[in-house]
Amino acid sequence: MADRSKSFQSAVLLFALILLIFLFTAITLSFLPQDLSDVDGRNADGSSTPPTRNLERVLENAASQGIKVTLTEEEINQWLSNQIQGTQDGLLKNQVQYRGAWVRLKEGSVDLIFEREAFNRTHTIAMNVQIEQLIEGNNQMSSNINWAGGRLGQMPVMQGYLALVMSSYEELAEVMKPEVKSLRTLLEGKALVKFEEGKVTFEPRSSSEDLGMPVF
């Protein structure tokens, strides 16, 4: 009986130790910023590079005329850097400085990233977004935006954490209202969306040879 009690106590202590290690690792990773050196169009020194195209107009033309358009990661981030002048509100506004909003275009998805300076340390929050497009039996297409989790610093997090940071993304959508409106028009107009490394393409189905699902 005594041996069983000691074994149980040892198992509890081992579980508690593992839990503490996990929590310590998670907290440490959450305060370590993810590496953004691979994000095209982001200047590490905080300076802004003028975009080569007016993306608001490019998206408006694509939506109204039903034409194919490809945007690169570099020009999107240059546009964001020039269009957004972020400020931090709330109790910590004197200790937190906005540094930028960025996108990282990957095969099949896009990371939406916020970068801030808090207490003299860089902090990042990222969401991964996927667009699911389905061809139905009547050859009609529907598009669904899926929030697939993200990263708090370097720590991967599940979709459930999004409620804690969704306000930041809602504010970004409000600032970029004309661009968001054109993107919504493209999706409602059944444009095919294809995310690739460093670029995203919107192509109206009427001009596409392949009317099936794009490869994500």
Image (cartoon, grey):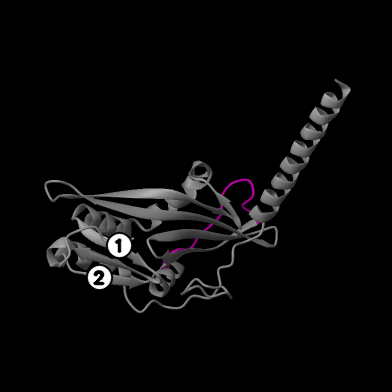
Does residue 174 lie above or below 73 as drawn? above
* Region in magenta: 83-95
Q: Residue sitting at 42 percent across and 78 percent down?
A: 50
In the rendered image, the quadrant that contains the N terminus is top right
Sequence-first tag of 2 and 1: 2
Circle 2: residue type: Val
The label nearer to you, 2 versus 1, is 1
Q: Residue sitting at 49 percent across and 75 percent down?
A: 48
Percent x, y for residue 120?
A: 70, 62
Q: Left or right: where does residue 75 sit relative to residue 1?
A: left
Percent x, y for residue 156?
A: 57, 52
Q: Left or right: where does residue 6 sit relative to residue 74?
A: right
Circle 2 is placed at which residue position? Answer: 69
Q: Is residue 154 visible?
A: yes
Relative depth, front residue between 181 and 84: 181
Question: Magenta stretch: residue 90 in it?
Answer: yes
Question: In the structure shown, which secondary structural element does the residue marked by tag 1 occupy?
Answer: loop
Q: Residue sitting at 39 percent across and 59 percent down?
A: 109
Question: Magenta stretch: residue 22 in it?
Answer: no
Examine the residues drawn in magenta and state their main secondary structure: loop
The residues bearing labels 2 and 1 have C-alpha atoms spaced at a distance of 17 Å
Percent x, y for residue 118?
A: 65, 57
Question: In the structure shown, which secondary structural element does the residue marked by tag 2 occupy?
Answer: strand
Circle 1 is placed at which residue position? Answer: 215
Circle 1: residue type: Val
